[in-house]
Image: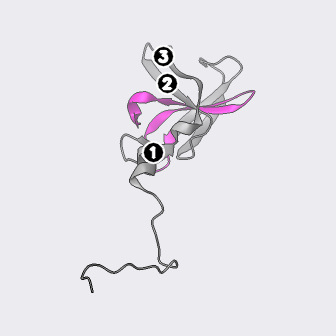
């Protein structure tokens, strides 16, 4: 008879289904580590660098969805970096940090600021 460990095969036990592998695939808020989106939701062209009217530059990553980012504010087409698209702010649902912008036009996508994310 071997000494060792016992295995609990009770399928009803609460199991955290997230794994380190899943965590690594997440795009997270740099401020609070909240899951914002997934690399699998990246759209092409994925990366852009833009300058706003005030002269600030942003390196933006585009995703078809970002469930961890709230869509806030009134939409506007003023100074939109994507023709035919109106934008609103995208903020982290957990810490409310500004992460980028939601764009609405022929379709909807999030343009998130690379330096405000952990990939």
Question: Which residue in the rendered view is the most extreme toward the bottom?
Answer: 1
Q: Which residue is mark 2?
A: 60
- Residue located at (56% from left, 28% from top): 62
The one of 40 and 6 positioned closer to us in this rendering:
6
The one of 103 and 38 positioned closer to us in this rendering:
38
Q: Which mark is residue 66?
A: none
Q: Secondary structure at mark 1?
A: loop
Q: Residue 4 occupies which quadrant of the picture?
A: bottom left
Q: Which residue is mark 1?
A: 96
- Circle 2/circle 3 CB separation < 8 Å: yes
Q: Look at the image and give the residue range highlighted in magenta.
A: 91-119
Q: Disc 2 versus disc 1: distance between alpha carbons?
A: 18 Å
- Taking the magenta stretch, the answer to whether it contains residue 110 is yes
- Circle 3 crowding by C-alpha within 10 Å: few under 14, some 14–19, many from 20: few
Q: Disc 3 versus disc 1: distance between alpha carbons?
A: 23 Å
Q: Which mark is residue 49?
A: 3
Mark with earlier residue (3, 1) = 3
Q: 11 left or right of 108? A: left
Mark with earlier residue (2, 3) = 3
Q: Secondary structure at mark 2?
A: strand
Q: Position of residue 86 (x, y in %)?
A: 67, 26
């Amino acid at each position: 008879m071997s000494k060792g460990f016992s295995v609990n095969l009770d399928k009803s036990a609460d199991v955290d289904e997230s794994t380190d592998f899943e965590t690594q695939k997440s795009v997270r808020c740099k401020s609070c580590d909240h899951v914002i989106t997934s690399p699998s939701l990246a759209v092409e062209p994925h990366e852009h660098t833009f300058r706003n009217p005030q002269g600030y530059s942003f390196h933006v990553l585009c995703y078809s969805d970002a469930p961890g980012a709230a869509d806030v504010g009134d939409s506007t087409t003023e100074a939109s970096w994507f023709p035919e698209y109106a934008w609103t702010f995208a903020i982290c649902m957990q810490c409310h940090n500004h992460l980028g912008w939601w764009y609405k036009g022929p379709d909807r996508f999030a343009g998130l600021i690379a330096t405000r994310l952990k990939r």
